[in-house]
Amino acid sequence: MFGDPDLPQREGARLRSAWAEALGATPSALEGTGITRVERADLGAVIVLVLGAATVVAAPPSAKRAIAALPLAALHDVEAIAAALPGSRAIGTAHLLFTGTRPAHPAHAVVPATSLDVAAVGAAMDEDEWAEAGVQGMERRWAVHDEQHAAAVAGYQRWHGTIAHVGVAAVPEHRRRGYASSAAAGAVSAAIDAGFVAQWRCRVGNEASLRLADRLGFTRLGTQSAVVLHDG
């Protein structure tokens, strides 16, 4: 069971249920300390989820033998998994953080984002960084402005019924001024008020994103790793 005081038992159960549904496992697979292997014929990748002390490995039948031969430690190493599967490509590992509590009141005014706000922030950012933030495709979005221009945008996307996946992006020259924190706080608060558990995902190595999530009250509970298989 999840014992962190920032994620009560009810929210922990919802979190396990959502991730179990996403991977094709049972919620009990994400309890305790064991490793559960799920065979998924529809997958074109190997996905390893670590949530709390539990691990779920989801993979297609074509990868089953190679994955089964790996030592347990290698299941948490995307490069080791990719090396065991010729032609595959390691996507990487992301931190998973969650909260069921509204963050502190934002320092800057947060307003519903227009499509122009989103486009302006996206145009000012590196293409890969903008794609990683994922704000463009989110169903609900908010913005913080510096005078007349959008300095940061954030939003959330409903995921498997009870989870709100949160994303945030800020114009590079407006960073370290609290704009991204305020926009994200608005998105997280709206998600919590709508009855969701808020999820934050950022790649390992993105320390700025981790620090922002920590300031917003998110708790680190696991990681998600992915290795894409070769075509066919």
Image: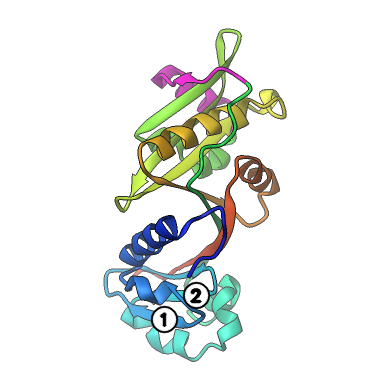
The amino acid type found where label 2 is placed reads Ala
Task: Tell me residue 57's x, y (percent).
Answer: 43, 76
Instruction: Sort mark 1 into few (<14), some (14-19) or many (20+) by Cα contacts within 10 Å.
Output: some
- For residue 75, what is the image quadrant? bottom right
- For residue 156, what is the image quadrant? top left
Residue at the spot 69% in from the left edge and 24% down from the top edge: 173
Q: Mark 2 = which residue?
A: 54
Say if 34 sits above or below 202 in the image: below
Front in this rendered view, residue 139 or 232: 139
Q: Is residue 121 magenta?
A: yes
Q: Is residue 215 visible?
A: yes
Q: Is residue 212 magenta?
A: no
Is label 1 or label 2 in front?
2
Q: Do the numbered discs 1 and 2 sit on residues whose CB atoms are within 8 Å?
A: yes
Residue at the spot 42% in from the left edge and 32% down from the top edge: 190
Q: Is residue 94 visible?
A: no
Task: Tell me residue 102's x, y (percent).
Answer: 51, 38
Alpha carbon of mark 1 to alpha carbon of mark 2: how far?
Answer: 8 Å
Please tell me the numbered disc located at residue 36: 1
Scheme by which the image is coloured? rainbow
Q: Which stretch did the figure color magenta?
A: 108-125
Callout 1 secondary element: strand
What residue occupies the far left of the structure in this picture? 41
Task: Tell me residue 107's x, y (percent).
Answer: 63, 22
Please tell me the numbered disc located at residue 104: none
The amino acid type found where label 1 is placed reads Thr
| Between discs 1 and 2, the one toward the N terminus | 1
